[in-house]
Image (tube, rainbow, N blue to C red):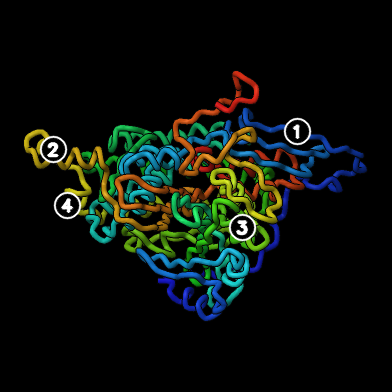
Amino acid sequence: MSQNVLERLKAQFTGGELLDTGSQHGDEWARIRRDAWVTVATFLRDDPATKMEMFTDLTVVDRFATEPRFDVVLHLYSVSLKQRVRLYAGVPEEDPTLETLVPVWAGANWFEREAYDLYGVRFKGHPDLRRILMYPEFVGHPLRKDYPKEKRQPLVRRQPGSVD
Amino acid sequence: MDNTLAPPQTRRVVMGIQEPQDFDAPELPTEPLPLNMGPSHPAMHGTVRMVLEVEGEKISSADVQIGYLHRCFEKESEFATWTQVFPYTDRLNYISPMLNNVGYAMAVEKLLGITNQIPERAQYIRVIVGEMSRITDHMTCLGASAMELGAFTVFLYMLKAREWLFELIEEVCGARLTVSYLRIGGCAWDLPEGFAEKLRSILERSKGVLAEVSTLLDRNRIFRDRLDGIGVVTQQDCLQYGITGPVARSTGLAYDVRKDAPYLVYDRFDFDVPVGSVGDNFDRYAVRVEEMKQSMRILEQALQQIQPGPVAVNDPRIILPAKSETYNSIEAMIAHFKIIMDGIHVPPGEVYSYTEAGNGELGFYLVSDGTGRPWKCRVRPPCFAATAILPELLKGLFIADIVPTFGLMNMIGGECDR
């Protein structure tokens, strides 16, 4: 449906920034090299053929046991051209960092805070990277696949310093 | 529909006293004071804490802290079968649970590739229960907001009408809020007998309630003074923050998923997308009132058009066999066991599916690894985006302005915090 967005990306980014593109169930997606994340996002927002003005969603997928382990997933929508695109950026476990998108869309702020809170991906340059859904004393990142579902972290601890 | 960005319009004339210079007295020196609002403040719905810094009555900075209603929706979903996620979705936006059911069911169906096979009657039923939920959603939002501004009568009237709809939903599925009525591939069962007549009568009475409420509020000086020109959101803000739904439409941004990317049978109905011009609190109120009327239009047309037929796809891998068969034939019992224990096997893939919920674009981003349980089940909550703008929006307002501004954003803890 939004194939032209991918065509536009392919024409613009020939230096290897675009790792892969595809289309599944009518959703177009592109995998972006990590260091080109902000450049590609800004281009998609400003280019008259794509016009992705609306920040829709940002989240992380933990692809446990594959490399890179995390995928930051960004969904964009163009209100004026009615087209959508999904972007991925692979983030390895050893260095889970990515440039922030807050200067591009102010709304990325809370979504990136959530991604940091639940997956532990840190966004470089984020103005206020605090936990958002969990409490500040929480240890670990609960949506990682290696965080046990049954693990409990009571706020009032029996022994000071212990986690569970 | 025209989606081009209109220039921001001028503020409506504000009737009340808004700026210190409106007083004759000179501005008194103040010093910044930290003030905690919530989470146990009645206007914060028990789910948000705001750490304000106020200078006199004016807010100089606001830190909106959410997460008090975090229930680990995603983590729990990853350990549930695709069907078992439905009860969790009920509790997302708990004042319009059917719309969450619709959004989730459609996302899984998109992943299964059976979107086109859903029987027509099931699609109409989804529209009908969904629009009923949209009305209950807006009624709760407006009723509660009006009550917070002192109009307790409005709250009682709105909840009276909401109760009629909830009672009808209870007749459909046995529960008022925790509905779990939809299934992947259709609905759990058909609508009860006499549903259409009851709904028509409720719509008729609800229109009366809306008329009553509008005479109470629309030209009410106290109500208008608290709403007009306060909490102005621009179209640019909406795009930047990803705000959709009534809040975006109040700014004049005519984005409605039902019109821009019609799903189910929404393209067969004649309805309008109401938009505001200023984007202040009053516009958000007015847009919601008008949306309820449009939902009623859709409901009336849907009741006209709906035809008898099956309410779920005829696929034993997706839909449970009839109970009589489960108990009497070994094949049906095996099929039942497989779906309950293993779950529906969804092919590997990723999908983003979006519908128009009470608060805007409700997206489901699902990742399947081919098993009976989701690898990831992400909700894109519309009111999370709307709440994210509050720290910006509240700056420079009075403490008393928080109540209507926050109320008409319709932040629903269950959806925002998941």
Query: Residue B285: where, in percent of width, then height?
Result: 56, 48
Other-residue count near label 2 (Cα within 10 Å), few / some / many at <14 / 14–19 / ≥20: some
| Residue type indicated by callout 3 | Leu
On whether disc 3 and disc 4 are found on a single subunit, the reply is no
| Residue type indicated by callout 2 | Met
Q: Could you tell which of marks 4 and 1 lies nearer the N-terminus?
A: 1
Mark 3 near mark 4, Cβ–Cβ under 8 Å? no
Q: Residue at 64% of width from left, 59% of height from top?
A: A99
Query: Residue B179: where, in percent of width, then height?
Result: 34, 37
| Residue type indicated by callout 4 | Asn
Q: Could you tell which of marks 2 and 4 lies nearer the N-terminus?
A: 4
Check residue B333 in the rendering and tell me which mark sits there, or answer none.
2
Q: Is residue A10 above or below residue B363?
A: below
Alpha carbons under labels 4 and 1: distance apart: 59 Å
- At mark 3, the secondary structure is strand
- Chain containing mark 3: A
Alpha carbons under labels 2 and 1: distance apart: 61 Å
Other-residue count near label 3 (Cα within 10 Å), few / some / many at <14 / 14–19 / ≥20: many
Alpha carbons under labels 1 and 3: distance apart: 35 Å
Check residue A98 in the rendering and tell me which mark sits there, or answer none.
3
Q: Is residue A47 visible?
A: yes
On whether disc 2 and disc 1 are found on a single subunit, the reply is yes
- At mark 2, the secondary structure is helix
Mark 1 near mark 3, Cβ–Cβ under 8 Å? no
- What residue is disc 4 on? B314
Query: Residue A117: where, in percent of width, then height?
Result: 58, 43
Give the mark toward the camera: 1 or 3.
Answer: 3
Mark 2 near mark 1, Cβ–Cβ under 8 Å? no
| Residue type indicated by callout 1 | Leu
Give the mark toward the camera: 2 or 1.
Answer: 2
- What residue is disc 1 on? B35
